Image (tube, rainbow, N blue to C red):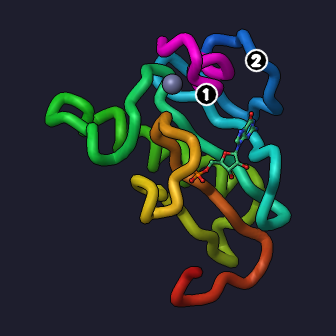
């Protein structure tokens, strides 16, 4: 837990969010500024700053984040049409909250390349 981290507070139930899934390792909640009709963030409950800080022993946890995203995509009914998983990393990657998270966005057509 990092005291000033908003996502640590959400994971610890100290800050409100529309939580859609939670277990021992991860929490998933709706993004406060959705960029698509479905926009969910999947975070590790333990503070990891970004993908740059993933350690060898975190590999199962990161896999669990992706698996959770895939299960939520099915639950939200966007698995068949498709969706996008994103992990912005560092300032130039567009990361603004420095508690690692996977964006699950869907229910509209995505484009490539991203902005
Ligand atoms: P990033 O830019 O770091 O990849 O993504 C951060 C995301 O977190 C943004 O999409 C932003 O809208 C979302 N966000 C920031 N603060 C909060 C918050 O307090 N609650 C929720 N639910 N989402 C947040
Ligand atoms: Zn944190």
Q: Quadrant of ligand 1?
A: top right
Res. 113 mark: none
* Mark nearer the N terminus (2 vs 1): 1
| Closest to the observer, 96 or 18 | 96
Q: Going by the picture, which residue comes out furthest to the left?
A: 56
- Mark 1 beta carbon near ligand 2 (under 8 Å): yes
Residue 13, picture quadrant: top right
- Mark 2 beta carbon near ligand 1 (under 8 Å): yes
Quick one: SS at disc 1? helix
Residue 67: x and y in percent read 46, 47
Residue occupying the point 74% across, 55% down: 39
Res. 15 mark: 2
Residue occupying the point 85% across, 64% down: 37
| Closest to the observer, 5 or 102 | 5
Residue 5 lies within the magenta run: yes
Q: Magenta span covers which residues?
A: 1-11
Residue 52: x and y in percent read 28, 46
Above or below, 106 against 9 in this view is below
Residue occupying the point 18% across, 29% down: 57
Above or below, 71 against 111 in this view is above
Q: How many C-alpha atoms fall within 10 Å of the one at disc 1: few (<14), some, or many (≥20)?
A: many
Q: Going by the picture, which residue comes out furthest to the bottom?
A: 112
Q: Gap between marks 2 and 1, in whole Å?
A: 8 Å
Residue 62, picture quadrant: top left
Residue bearing mark 1? 7
| Closest to the observer, 107 or 31 | 31
Residue 7 lies within the magenta run: yes
Q: How many C-alpha atoms fall within 10 Å of the one at disc 2: few (<14), some, or many (≥20)?
A: few
């Amino acid at each position: 837990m990092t005291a000033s981290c908003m996502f640590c507070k959400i994971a610890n139930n100290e800050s409100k969010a529309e939580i859609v899934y939670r277990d021992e390792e991860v929490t998933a909640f709706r993004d406060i500024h959705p960029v698509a009709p479905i926009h969910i963030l999947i975070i590790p409950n333990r503070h990891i700053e970004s993908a740059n800080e993933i350690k060898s022993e975190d590999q199962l946890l990161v896999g669990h984040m992706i698996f959770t995203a895939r299960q939520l995509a099915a639950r939200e009914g966007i698995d068949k049409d498709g969706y996008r998983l994103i992990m912005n990393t560092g300032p130039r990657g567009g990361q603004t909250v420095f508690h690692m998270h996977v964006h699950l966005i869907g229910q509209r057509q995505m484009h490539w390349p991203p902005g």
